[in-house]
């Protein structure tokens, strides 16, 4: 039903069905597929909605696509290499939906590995208190870009209204985007927000008190992440808005790549004190990281971890995301941030 709604909505905007490709991955599982646990096809996620570990749809790009990160990345690569786009539009890394930010991350990772010439535009849908108000207000703007003409705004609203299965509580959110403008951020691929080499450091900043959960728990609200490359080690310092308290767990993910899969490493780390734990995908294999090689610490308003660098000689970039949880609930998270690595 969702696919048919998509085809009808896109047709109303002048996009024919043969220009649409469905990948067939499961709703509300993409964040798990982006992790080390479900990256490889021998341990896919199982969708409770379809009771399947592979795509059950006969129109998926890859028939019976396995529900894992490696498959998802491979399918996005197929599309980009086939289309060779000049412009790519995807989800903004600050979107907090568990399917949205991984979608944007996969697209950006693939572009950085295989196609550096496209212009990348990103858009935001899911974020606390965004947009305001959450209702159909066609005369309002989202921000300051060039305004759409009234007939275009109406056409956008009509296309949104075709998603009948997206009704209920989410309907006011969807209709709130039928405004007199569209809002995009331009992220040129290959122009890095940061570059790091041996002995240098990088600061990733995060807005504070920007989510309902982190307003209630300032001791789990991330202000910035400081990254430093020292010898064969990577050191991360997560600075919080208030002094830390027991019960908060700190998390860090690394997705590193270069010119192809041979340079790719995916690693996840978790700590709440001196004991840190991690797992990594290297050379197509999942392995637990020896926690004796990790050094976690939590003091005042800083949670830090030092770990062996996942970088190989061919690695050219790293994507980093940090987040905090309490009783498995995400309190705050940074955007997935990419930076270049130089020898």
Image (tube, helix red, strand yellow):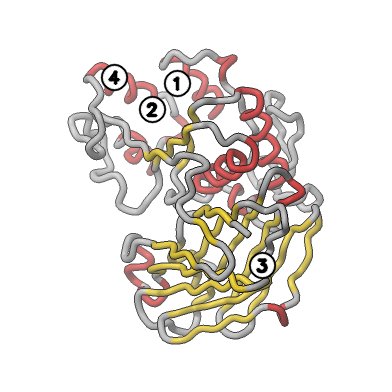
Residue underneath mark 1:
9
Q: Earlier in the sequence, mark 2 or mark 3?
A: 2
Q: Is residue 331 visible?
A: yes
Find disc 3 in the rendering and name its residue: 309
**2 and 3 marks in contact (CB < 8 Å):** no
Give neighbour class at mark 1: few <14, some 14-19, many 20+ (Cα, 10 Å): many
Task: Point out residue 315 in the picture as x, y percentages from the top left corner.
Answer: 67, 53
Q: Quadrant of residue 218?
A: bottom left
Rendered position, 248 above or below 61 = below
> In screen coordinates, is 70 left or right of 188?
right
Cα gap from disc 1 to disc 3, whole angstroms = 46 Å
Secondary element under disc 3, as helix, strand or loop, is loop
| Residue shown at the point (38%, 83%) measured from the top left | 243
Mark closer to the observer (2, 3): 3
Task: Please name the residue that numbered disc 2 is placed on.
Answer: 160
Give me the C-alpha separation between circle 1 and circle 2: 7 Å
Residue under circle 4?
A: 152
Near-viewer residue (227 or 199): 199
Asked if the residues shown at circle 4 and circle 3 are in contact, with their CB atoms under 8 angstroms apart, the answer is: no
What whole-number distance in Å separates the C-alpha atoms at marks 2 and 4? 12 Å
């Amino acid at each position: 039903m969702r696919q048919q709604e998509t085809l009808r909505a896109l047709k109303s905007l002048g996009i024919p069905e043969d220009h649409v490709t469905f990948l067939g991955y499961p709703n509300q599982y993409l964040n798990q597929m982006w992790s080390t646990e479900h990256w490889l096809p021998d341990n896919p996620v199982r969708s409770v909605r379809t009771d399947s570990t592979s795509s059950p749809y006969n129109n998926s790009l890859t028939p019976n696509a396995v529900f894992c990160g490696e498959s998802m990345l491979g399918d996005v690569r197929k599309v980009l290499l086939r289309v060779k786009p000049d412009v790519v539009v995807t989800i903004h890394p600050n979107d907090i939906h568990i399917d949205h930010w991984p979608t944007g991350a996969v697209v950006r990772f693939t572009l950085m590995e295989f196609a550096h010439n496209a212009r990348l535009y990103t858009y935001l849908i899911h974020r606390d208190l965004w947009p305001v108000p959450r209702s159909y207000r066609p005369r309002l703007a989202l921000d300051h870009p060039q305004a759409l003409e009234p007939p275009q705004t109406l056409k956008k609203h009509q296309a949104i209204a075709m998603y009948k299965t997206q009704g209920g509580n989410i309907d006011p959110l969807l209709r709130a985007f039928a405004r007199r403008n569209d809002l995009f951020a331009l992220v040129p691929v290959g122009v890095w927000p940061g570059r790091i080499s041996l002995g240098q450091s990088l600061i990733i900043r995060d807005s504070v008190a920007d989510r309902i959960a982190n307003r209630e728990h300032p001791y789990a609200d991330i202000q910035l992440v400081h990254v430093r490359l020292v010898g064969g080690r990577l050191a991360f310092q997560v600075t919080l808005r208030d002094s830390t308290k027991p019960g908060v767990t700190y998390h860090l993910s690394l997705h590193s790549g270069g010119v192809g899969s041979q340079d790719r490493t995916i690693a996840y780390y978790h700590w709440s004190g001196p004991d840190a734990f991690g797992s990594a995908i290297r050379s197509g294999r999942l392995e637990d990281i020896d926690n004796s090689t990790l050094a976690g610490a939590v003091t005042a308003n800083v949670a830090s971890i030092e770990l062996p660098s996942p970088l190989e000689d061919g690695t050219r970039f790293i994507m980093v995301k940090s987040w905090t949880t309490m009783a498995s609930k995400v309190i705050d998270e940074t955007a997935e941030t990419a930076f270049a690595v130089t020898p």
